[in-house]
């Protein structure tokens, strides 16, 4: 499976009280797995993630806006390779009892 298995996240979201929303995601860039051995070998290098200097990427947000029935946008910042940018991250919130898978 492709992705970043070394990622960690913490989220607090109550759709009834969106003003209390926050999220923090930390991605261990050395854990990149694409399923392509050549690409996976290249990604940690200086031309791509440069994990020797920038081992992690982070996304954090403290603001959310509703865009549809179960759809939202998290407004926050992404830090990657020492560069910080404002980012809007769309997401879907589906509650299943007391959890949101």
Image: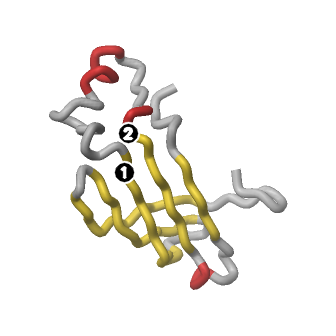
Q: Residue at x 55, y 65 (%)?
A: 71
**Contact, CB < 8 Å: mark 2 with mark 1?**
yes
The image shows residue 7, relative to residue 46, as above or below, that is below
Tell me residue 94's x, y (percent): 68, 58
Give the residue at x 25% y 44%. 53
Residue at the (39%, 70%) spot, across then down: 76
Going by the image, does 7 lie left or right of 56?
right
**Residues under labels 2 and 1: Cα distance?**
7 Å
Residue placed furthest toward the front: 52
> Up-down: is 71 above or below 8?
below
| Helix, strand or loop at mark 2 | helix
Front-lying residue, 37 or 98: 37
Quarter location, residue 88:
bottom left
What is the crowding at mark 1: few (fewer than 14 residues within 10 Å), some, or many (at least 20)? many
The reply, left or right, for residue 101 in relation to residue 54 is right
Q: What is the basis of the colouring in this image? A: secondary structure
Q: Is residue 85 above or below residue 40?
A: below
* Farthest right residue in view: 97
Q: Is residue 50 left or right of residue 13?
A: left
Measured from the top left, where is residue 95 in percent x and y? Answer: 73, 60
Across and down, in percent, residue 85 comes to 26, 65
**Residue 80 locus on image (x, y percent):** 29, 52
**Mark 2 surroundings: few (<14), some (14-19) or many (≥20) residues within 10 A:** many
- Circle 1 sits on which residue? 57
Query: Where 38 sits versus 93, above or below?
Result: above
Task: Label 1, secondary structure: give it.
Answer: strand
What residue appears at the point 29 percent right and 46 percent down from the top-left corner? 54
Q: Is residue 94 left or right of residue 48?
A: right
66 or 27, which is in the foreground?
27
Check disc 2 and report the residue beneath it. Answer: 29
Q: Which mark is residue 48?
A: none
């Amino acid at each position: 499976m492709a992705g970043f298995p070394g990622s960690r996240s913490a989220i607090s979201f109550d759709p009834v009280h969106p003003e209390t929303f926050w999220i923090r995601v930390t991605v261990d860039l050395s854990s990149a797995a694409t399923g392509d051995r050549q690409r996976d070998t290249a990604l940690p290098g200086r031309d791509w993630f440069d994990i020797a200097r920038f081992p992690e990427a982070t996304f954090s947000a403290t603001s959310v806006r509703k865009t549809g029935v179960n759809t939202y946008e998290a407004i926050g910042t992404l830090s990657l390779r020492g560069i910080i940018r404002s980012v809007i991250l769309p997401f879907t919130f589906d509650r299943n009892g007391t959890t949101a898978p």
